[in-house]
Image (cartoon, rainbow, N blue to C red):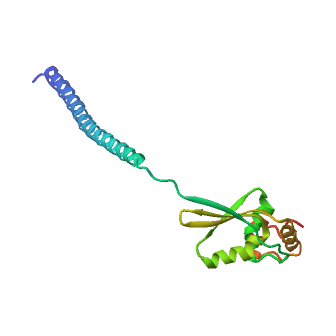
Amino acid sequence: MSSLRRLSCIKVWKVDLKLNILLSEILTQIKNNSKRVKLLKLFEELIKEDDLQINQINNIDIPPPKMSSEKFETKETSDQPSSLAQYIMAPFILVDSNGMNDIPVFDYVIKKLVLEEIAPHFSELKKIAIDHKMFIRVQNVKESSKNIFLNLIKNCRINQIVNDIYSGGNSSWLK
C-alpha cells in the first residue's frame, strides 16, 4: 500500500471517528432531551393538579372565626409587681409604650394569675375570645406601676431575667 493511500485511509478513519463521537453526543442529547421533556410534562401535570386542588380549597366556604371583645377594669395597686408582671411590663416601659400583649388564658388558674398579678398594672384591658380560645389583652402601663418599676431598676431590685433581657449586658443601665 502506498503511503499516500495509507495517509488517506488514516484521514478517513479520523473523520469517521469524529463523526462517531459527534453522533454519540447527539444521541446522548436526544436521550437527555426526551428525559427533560418527560420531566417537564410531569411537572406541568403536577402544577395543574395543584391549581385544581387550590381552586377546590378556595371554593369551600369557611366561616370566619367567632370573635368577641369585652373591656374590663381592675383595682388600683401600689404593690410591687411580681416577676411575671415585671416581665410583661418591661417592653412597655423600656422599649415602646405603644403596644399591646395578648396573653393566652388556657384555664382558670392562668386567668386568676393574670388578673391578680399582671392586670392591675395596666390601664387598658380586654378579654378577647376567638372561637374557643381566650386571651387577655393588656395595653398602657399605669403611671404608678411604671414609677414602681423604674424604682426597682434604680435600686437594683428588678427581676434578674428582666435585667438580663433588657440591660444589654450593661450593669449600670438606666441609672
The residue located at (53%, 57%) in the rendering is 65
User: How many marks can you see?
Assistant: 0
- Residue 119, image quadrant: bottom right
> Which quadrant of the figure contains the C terminus?
bottom right
Viewer-proximal residue among 71 and 142: 71
Residue 77 % position (x, y): 83, 74
Question: Farthest residue in the top direction?
Answer: 4
Q: Position of residue 58 (x, y in %)?
A: 42, 46
Q: Does residue 154 sit above or below 17 in this rendering? A: below
Task: Please indicate whether residue 97 sits to the left or right of residue 10 in the image.
Answer: right
Residue farthest toward the left in the current orientation of the protein: 1
- Is residue 76 shown left or right of residue 50? right
As drawn, 45 above or below 134: above
Q: Position of residue 147 (x, y in %)?
A: 88, 68
x%, y% of residue 115? Answer: 71, 74
Left or right, 23 with reference to 172: left
Q: Picture quarter containing residue 25? A: top left
Vertical placement of 10 versus 53: above or below? Answer: above
Give the camera-side residue of 103 and 157.
Answer: 103
Residue 168 appears anywhere in the view: no
Q: Give the quarter of the image for residue 15.
A: top left
Q: Could one spot residue 61 in this view of the protein?
A: yes
Say whether residue 57 is left or right of residue 42. right
For image coordinates 67% across by 77% down, the residue present is 112
Quarter of the picture containing the N terminus is top left
**Which residue is pictured at 35% across the width and 42% down the height?**
47
